[in-house]
Every structure is written in structure tokens, then in C-alpha cells.
Amino acid sequence: MAGGDQRAGLIPAMLKQWRASRGLSQLDLALAAGISARHVSFIETGRSAPSAEMVLRIGSTLGVPLRQVNAMLAAAGHDEVFDEPVELAPPVLEALDFLKSHHEPFPLVVMDHTYTLLDANRAATTLFGLLLDRPPAAADGVTGLNLARLTFDPAGAQPYLVNFEEVGRQLLWRIQREVLADPDDGQLHELLDELLAMPTVADDWREVNLAVPSDPAIVLHLRRDGVDLRFLTTVTMFQAPQNVAVEQVRIEQWFPYDEATADMCRSSAGTGAR
């Protein structure tokens, strides 16, 4: 708690930063959180120290990432409430294994918030083996790859993305939005800087157009060595995560966009066409 007292002056600045990043006035935040605008003003000026419950309410209202909510709690002199484990809990791993197996023979990858692969099913490792000239032996062979870097890297998957102009622009703008949503995420900042330095990024992609809505799903058109594949991709997350590691997990499922792609996936898996 002593550390919280020393950092108490941070909570007004943190609240202002997150409120401003969401484009809300003090009154907007007060109405959304069900508290008085006067109370919000008092917290932001340091005249009132928020309780742990108030920090959690404000953090939830503003959509603050759990690790940043922990930081806000510490700054206000309270204990952190969200676990930050190094590894995922067994029930989460079991759920991921279930999803991986049931999505076969179509690709599914598990990644963190920086687009780094944590796991993949057999269909995904087969596909990456095709694109990257790697043997599709096991998920360990793709763990650690970064999907965002692969997308833009001229020595990676970029040459085989037929609709790279669409996919690259959408992915870059998505990451830019994520950086804006969590400005303290140093890892995302580093990834964005690295992507912006790539020669495949067009000049007119470098500034995100917030007026253009982010597509909920992207169609990938891949072509290499006579193999032509189209996938509709979706990204899902665990609902209401209660620890930081689970909050950062992204599950990307690739669905065949046409029957030819579906047949190719089934053939590669040895299940045959249906």
C-alpha cells in the first residue's frame, strides 16, 4: 500500500489519459459509469481518492485492458485483482485444444495480442509449410511466428497474398486502432513501427482513417505453386476474461470461402471431398 501512496498522483493522470483516448467528456464518463460528474472531476483533480470498486467500474466503462486496470488500482493504493500468469490455465488450454481439433481440416491459429502465434492446428501448420517452405510437422514449427510480420514481409507470406493491398491495409489499420486503444502497450508500438518500416507498406496506409470501419472478417486469397486458396478469417476472444493472459488470447479461424478451397483442405488432411 505504501507504493500506492507514493504513486497516488498518477491516478488522476491515468484517468484523464484513458478518458481522452476514448473521446469522452467527464459528463460522458459519469453517465456511462452511473456516477456523478462531480465525482469524476474530483478524482481527476486529485481531490478524491477512488475506491477499488470505483476504479474497476471506471476501468470497465472505458474498456481499459486488465493489466492497465491493475496499474490503475496500484496507483490508487489498492491491491491488483487480475492475475497475470505466465501460462494459461488447464481449462483454457482444454478449450483451445477442443477448438483446434473440431475446426479441422481447416486452419485455426491461437495468437497473443501482438499477433505472435502461440499454437495452431494441423491444417494451419500444413498451410504455413506450403507458404514458408517448411515441413508441416508439428505446431512447434510455427509457434513464435508473427502473423502481422509474415503478412507484410516480402520474404514471408506477402508475395503469395493475391489481395495483399486489401488485407495489408486492413490489418495495418486494425493494429493502429489497437495502439490507439492501449497507448501504453510498448510491444504493440514496436510491432507497428516495424511494420511501417516495411517496403510493402503503401504511403497512404501510414495514417489510419478512423472514418473507415474495421471489417469484422477478412478474406485471404493465397496462391503459390498452382495452389489457389480463399479463406474467410474471423478472430474471437474469451468473454469476460479474469486474468491478463486469457484477455490477450486471440483465436483466428480460417473458413473456406469456396468449395475448391474446402476440397483442397480435406484432401490435404486425407479426409476426401464431401
Image: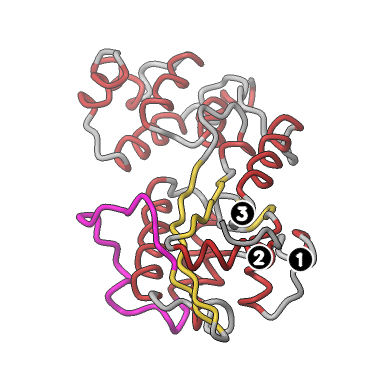
Q: Secondary structure at mark 2?
A: loop
Q: Which badge, 2 or 3, comes first in the chain's sequence? A: 3
Task: Tell me how far mark 3 sits from mark 1, CA to CA.
Answer: 13 Å
Q: Which badge, 3 or 1, comes first in the chain's sequence? A: 3
The residue that mark 2 highlights is 145
Query: Residue 163: x and y, percent?
Result: 38, 75
Query: Residue 216: x and y, percent?
Result: 36, 49
Side of 112 relative to 167 (left or right) = right
Query: Residue 251: x and y, percent?
Result: 56, 47
The residue that mark 3 highlights is 109
User: What type is the residue that disc 1 sits on?
Assistant: Gly
| Residues rendered magenta in the picture | 197-220
User: What type is the residue that disc 3 sits on?
Assistant: Val
Q: Are marks 3 and 1 in contact (CB under 8 Å)?
A: no
Point 43% across, 60% down: residue: 257
Circle 2 or circle 3, nearest the eye: 3
Q: Is residue 22 above or below residue 173?
A: above
The residue that mark 1 highlights is 141
Q: Report which quarter residue 109 is drawn in.
A: bottom right
Label 1 Cα neighbours within 10 Å, binned few <14 / some 14-19 / many ≥20:
some
